[in-house]
Amino acid sequence: MTALKDLINWLASPAIAVTLSMIGLVGAMFVKPLWTKKGGLVLFATLAGGFAFSFTDPNFRIVATMPDNVPILGMLFLVGFFFWYAMYQAHLNDARLAAGQPPLEKEDSDKKVFSWPDLVYVELVSLIICSIVLVVWSIVLKAPLEEPANPGAAPNPAKAPWYFLGLQELLVYFDPWMAGVVLPTLIIVGLMAIPYIDTNPRGNGYFSFRERKWEIVMFCFGFIILWVVLIILGTFLRGPNWNFFGPYEYWDPNKLVPLNNVSVSEIFWVKWLKTALPTFWLKRELPGILLILFYLGALPGLLSKTLFRRFYEKMGTVRFFVGVNLFLIMLAVPIKMYLRWIFNLKYIVNIQEFSFNI
Amino acid sequence: MSLERHWKKIQQQVVETQVWKSIFRVGIPNTNRKRVLAMLGNVVLHLHPVKTRKSGVKMRYTWCAGGMTFFLFLTLTFTGLLLMFYYRPTIEYAYGDMLDLREQVPFGIMREMHRWGAHAMVISVWIHMFRVFMTGSYKPPREFNWNVGVVLLVLTLLLSFTGYLLPWDQLAIWAITVGSNMARATPLAGNEGPFSAQIAVNGVNLVTAGSDARFGLLGGRIVGANALLRFYVLHCVFIPLIAAFLMAVHFWRVRKDGGISGPL
């Protein structure tokens, strides 16, 4: 039992958990048997069983039942269910499309019904169910209220509201101006840009996977991995001093994690060229700056001629470069995480003179 | 007479009273004509089209996630108004009012409904967005409405964030401290952000802890009395008004862009 819990603690550590969930999610989307009723039951049983098992552990129970962590458990199951449900319907439709039939929704969409009673009653029933759930939830579970606010006594860990914990988790890998300002802005901009970048006319108004594979993989990567998984990581697995704690580990405030982070400039000048760091910031940080310029400036152009040429031809210049830059920035998040995990890399560009660190 | 016939008779009599007829002009919508009139004559129902695509009526397709979000917004507006009877946004009273809401108000579950409902709304907005994405419903002609939806998603998070401070307990103040510390790192506009130290006149910094983006958000250097009042006003008036306006646009555009999406 202890060995199993140790294994799960190890599997839950950020580097492994993020890797596994990335491979797991993207891989799973192509495994058809998962997106059937049987597959859904297996997925649900695994998730629920894992939780039931975990609840026998006192350390897990303390964290999972913390105030405001309850909705996250709800979110986990709801997002999980609806992800399965969307994929289930998508694969049903895909089978029909492959057989030359229209999607399931097509039969219905040609018919129109009177909104009274068909639509109004569906809404009424949803409304009643929603009210009942909310009232029962409110009677059963008291809203959390902690000690009165004390500006002098910071709790450890001090956490943002749960829906921002993914962003707070990014603070481990990025400076606040990136994790707290630039990346959230780009998430909003990126979401808004989706309908203008995506020129694929198919899959409009029905569930389908095979007609929109890359759009769906990219969106789910952002939504499930970079948003939901990071929230869960930040909620359940980050304890005092924002140190990582496995799900069955006690949140020990004295846990020490050795940190010896380096920057690209240190690797380049000190480690490779065996000289002291140049004093002038531009010279010192040139390697990092060139890396960034290459990544965001030259790489999109290269991709348009090679790997993504098909997209470039289909999308046109403006769409392609906006889309690819947003995609590369999204990809930069896990890239930076891996650079940290593998090389202890803290900054690619480290211009303390202007507080400009990437 | 059987029970059913009694019931029919009572129903008949109620429907024919002057009071009933003055409220429901159409009567029981048992013909197509009356179904149309019922939808058109009611201010709430006329948000809907008279006829809807059959696929758009099905839970299987819409998950009712958007409708659920709207309903939760209404619930939150109502419970929030009730909470405003008791709650005073000052650091002297705020926490005490929370205790009173918990201990003194009979059958008091308004705070619980407001808090859990708020969490539920955040989740249902995400699920709505996910559904709209997975059905490709953002594609033409609905691009603009997807954008309105993204703004509404952000407003939902901001509503939840501003409301998070109001209980004025440790959870509230430190969550908002952690969150608003990010504003300090805004490039150019936050005092710890990139290049802001370079904005100086004759060696005097213009962007300081007393004039940066975080100060503007909180009305002070720390999460204190001004921040509480600001968040209260943002939470109860400012953001709900904008959100309500954008919801009207959102619903209007659903209809103008061809109703709930479906295969062409």
Image: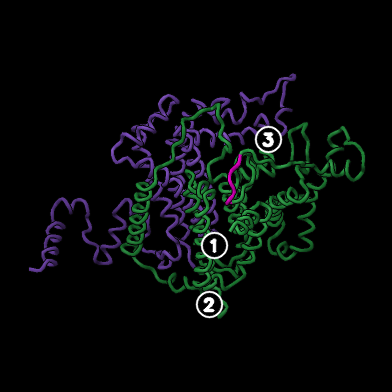
Chain colours: A green, B purple
Q: Residues within 10 Å of mark 1 (few under 14, many from 20)?
A: many
Q: Determine if marks 1 and 3 fall on one subunit.
A: yes
The residue under label 3 is: B187
Residue A281: x %, y % from top left: 83, 34
The residue under label 1 is: B134
Amino acid on which the number 2 mark rests in the picture: Arg
Residue A43: x %, y % from top left: 53, 66
* Label drawn at residue A115: none
Residues at marks 2 and 1, CA–CA distance in whole angstroms? 17 Å
Helix, strand or loop at label 2? It is helix
Tell me the quarter of the picture where residue A271 sits. top right
Amino acid on which the number 3 mark rests in the picture: Pro
Q: Which residues are magenta?
A: A247-252
> As drawn, which residue projects farthest toward the right?
A274
Q: Is residue A99 left or right of residue A339?
A: left
Relative depth, front residue between A249 and A140: A249
- Give the residue displayed 65% in from the left and 54% down from the top: A10
* Label drawn at residue A96: 2
Q: Residues within 10 Å of mark 3 (few under 14, many from 20)?
A: many
**Is residue B112 located in the magenta-colored stretch of the structure?**
no
- Give the residue displayed 58% in from the left and 46% down from the top: A250
Q: Is residue B256 above or below residue B233?
A: below
